[in-house]
Image (cartoon, rainbow, N blue to C red):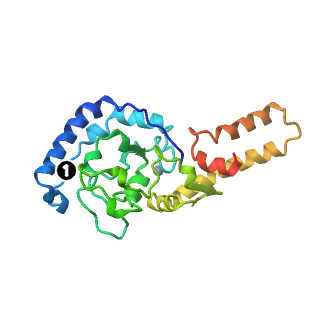
Amino acid sequence: MIKIKNPAKPPKTLIEKGAAENKENCAAYDYSPEDYRSGRKSFKFKNKIYGSKTVKKALLRAQYEKCCYCESKFRATSPGDVEHYRPKGAVKQTDGQRVEHPGYYWLAYDWNNLLVSCADCNRSYKKDLFPLKNRDARAHSHHDNIDDERPLFVNPAIDDPRRHIRFRGATPYHLTKVGRETIKGMGLRRDALEEKRIERLQGLKTIRDLVEGAKDPSDSKVKAARELLAASTRPNAEYSSMVQDFLGT
Ligand SMILES: [Zn+2]
């Protein structure tokens, strides 16, 4: 996982349609909060707004066309999900716990709560999970302050993920509790992902050995190989965080 920077200005559709929709949802909550807290009523969120082409395009560009959590380039086979860092429809502190309603409904169209992830990180792992260090401070409605919360998931648009998660070979390990919960919550050690990262490392090891064993470092092929290694550590490269640790850059 790497640090990303979303453009400061939200896409127009969030400012116009999203804000209007949010206003309605907040009014509906205020009219019957108990119905929403108990789960008797739930919000119908409009994917057409938060997941619109313009929103997704802006997020993907900021994320170097990769999943915000696992750094996979998924777009050849899957469109990916506009993902809510704070879950919009329901929330869980831990996997074993029952879901709490109504979730962070007031952040459904909030630019600062949106990321793009691959379907696996979002739907198979993270889902409604959003653990807090201080669970009693959880915001339950738009009247509460999310700034009081101390999330146990890395937000790559705010935090520097590398302060929390690093790699040993193809396997991520945690430096902090936030890193540990993120690896677990997003399934960053899942087999299919580990296999892809191993494959990536194997190719890079061959290139590195070639560069290190070269008799003439100024040879154009060796230079090209060196450039290839450098390119694989840049943010637009798949699994660049792992590669940075592998190459010690
Ligand atoms: Zn992912």
- Residue 200 can be seen, yes or no: no
Residue 163, given in percent of the width and then of the height, sits at 57, 52
Q: Is mark 1 within 8 Å of ligand 1?
A: no
Does residue 11 sit above or below 135 in this rendering?
above
Residue 234, given in percent of the width and then of the height, sits at 61, 39
Name the residue located 54 percent from the left edge and 60 percent from the top edge.
176
> 120 or 126: nearer the eye?
126
Quadrant housing the C terminus:
top right
Name the outermost residue toward the right.
215
Name the residue located 57 percent from the left edge and 50 percent from the top edge.
162
- Residue 233 can be seen, yes or no: yes
Task: Give the total number of marks visible in the rendering.
Answer: 1
Specify the amino acid type for callout 1.
Answer: Phe
Residue 42, given in percent of the width and then of the height, sits at 18, 54
Side of 22 where 73 appears, left or right: right
Task: Determine the image quadrant of residue 23.
Answer: top left
